[in-house]
Amino acid sequence: MKLQLLVFSLFSILIFGCSPNKENDSVFIGGEIINPVSEYFILSRDDKIIDTVFLNQKNQFRQQFKGLKEGIYTFNHPPENQIMYLSPGDSIMLWLNTMDFDQSINFSGRGAEKSSYLLEMFLHNQENNDFILSYYKIPPAEFASITDSIRKHRYNKLNRFIENKEYSEKFLDIAEASIDYEYFHLRERYTFLAEKYYRELAEQIPKGFHNYRDEIDFNNKNLSSYYVYNNFIEDFLRTQAIERCRSQNNPECYNLTNYEGIKYRILLGDSLIEEKKIKNRFLNRLASQGITFAKDSTDIEATLALLDSINYSGNFEDIKTMATIQKRLLPGNNLGELELLNKDLNSIKIKALTQKPAVTYHWSMYSKGHFYWQQNIINRLRERYPEVDFIGINIDNNTKQTWQKIVREDSKDPKYEFQLGEVDVNRELLQAYLHKLFFIDSSGTIVYGGAKLNSPTFEREILEFLNSQE
């Protein structure tokens, strides 16, 4: 790796020597991708593609961009993506290895330290997933003290980072927001887990624990593409829905995938968020959950009617398409004729996969962390419930070779992994099913379609499913 980075550094010097960025309104981006899994590098902002740059025979790329405004951008090397911070006049070289995408990214050149800072914050946020699982059972006062220390440490590090350097006010605002919203997010996640699973801890949460809620800006355009900000808002809406359950003596209130829970969050998001692009992102996400986890057609129609009543201005046609799909996936419908591809790319129908009751789980190469998390849980479930076949279905029907590679190298048992055949459905719509599992009988008929792998009742649902098949 050190040798590769040395070669990359020499390559950077050569590129910068040949392509000085003298135009103040232009941005140069070049780089090298080790073990590429696609042929191009895509730069985008706010979900709109700016340009697609193809790799050369040495897996390198370079492009001069004019007219880019300062802010957060997303770069994709499908199926992976990450963010970078660009300002007019920047000349940035990017090196990465797809075998360890996020951890391997190296930025260099004029302006690169801004992207490096945000990348470091991203990696901290990844570590926070383990942190919250280790500390969410401790008393809230103790958790508050730990998160205060984390925030203070982050600010001390930021102050050293910007010392004797000149950065724009816009970047400094985003750098500070990356710390603040990480802090807010940790406290929201703790509150959610305590309210849902440890009521005795929830009742100990001190009055000032959520004082930061007065600081929240739900309409920050500069943060609209920033994962920390978006993750926080999603969890804030979720926590608000759970907190309201305290006053309701109704166990169903804690089920956030039912219609009433979805309705509450949609109305809350609609009232709090004014910026159209941000609002539509969350309303779309919530409506997708409401439809894909609907128990029946009545819930599906209620969700559509709710969006209509608040004058939803997002892509209503996509939501309606998803509603049509979901009606075909309600219990009692049969998936037996649906065609999948096995690891050798041979076509096979669901009804021919197994003679046992089966549970299908779904994943995307655009969410590989989710796939690895699933694999560990599914592997344990296969050992515990040998009378059930757990079948993985990848939804990315346009990336066969990359899917084969991941299945052969990273799946626990490739013979249970399949890819969705050619279907005339937008992949973005299918992503709504990544957190949902279907229980089907040996003929492919759906018995239950509302299961979630991380639900505390999931194994009870498996047992009930097995009893129904006897």
Image (spheres, helix red, strand yellow):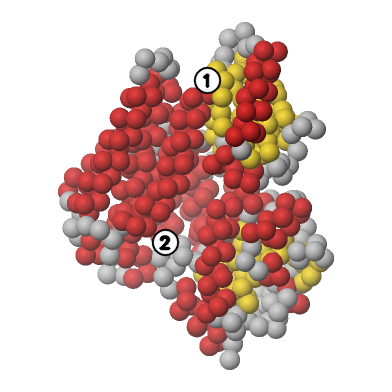
Nearer to me, 258 or 117: 117
Q: Position of residue 251 (x, y in %)?
A: 34, 71
CA separation in Å, label 2 and label 1: 43 Å
Q: Residue at x 64, y 59 (%)?
A: 410
Q: Residue at x 65, y 69 (%)?
A: 413
Q: Within 10 angstroms of label 2, few (less than 14), some, or many (20 or more) residues?
A: many
Counting residues from the start of the chain, the first of labels 2 and 1 encountered is 1
Q: Residue at x 26, y 41 (%)?
A: 149
Q: Amino acid at mark 2?
A: Leu
Residue that extends furthest to the bottom in the rendered view of this protein: 470
Residue that extends furthest to the front in the rendered view of this protein: 3
Q: Within 10 angstroms of label 1, few (less than 14), some, or many (20 or more) residues?
A: many
Q: Quadrant of residue 358?
A: bottom right
State the residue position of label 1. 111
Q: Quadrant of residue 97?
A: top right
Q: Residue at x 21, y 65 (%)?
A: 200
Residue that extends furthest to the right in the rendered view of this protein: 346
Mark 2 or 1, closer to the camera: 1
Q: Amino acid at mark 1?
A: Gly
For label 1, the SS is loop
Q: Is residue 12 above or below residue 348?
A: above
On the question of residue 301 being in view, the answer is no
State the residue position of label 2. 256
Q: Position of residue 32 (x, y in %)?
A: 68, 31
Q: Position of residue 443 (x, y in %)?
A: 70, 81
Q: Is residue 15 above or below residue 175?
A: above
Q: Quadrant of residue 33?
A: top right
Q: Is residue 403 left or right of residue 358?
A: right
For label 2, the SS is loop
- Whether tag 2 and tag 1 are in contact, CB under 8 A, the answer is no
Q: Is residue 305 left or right of residue 405?
A: left
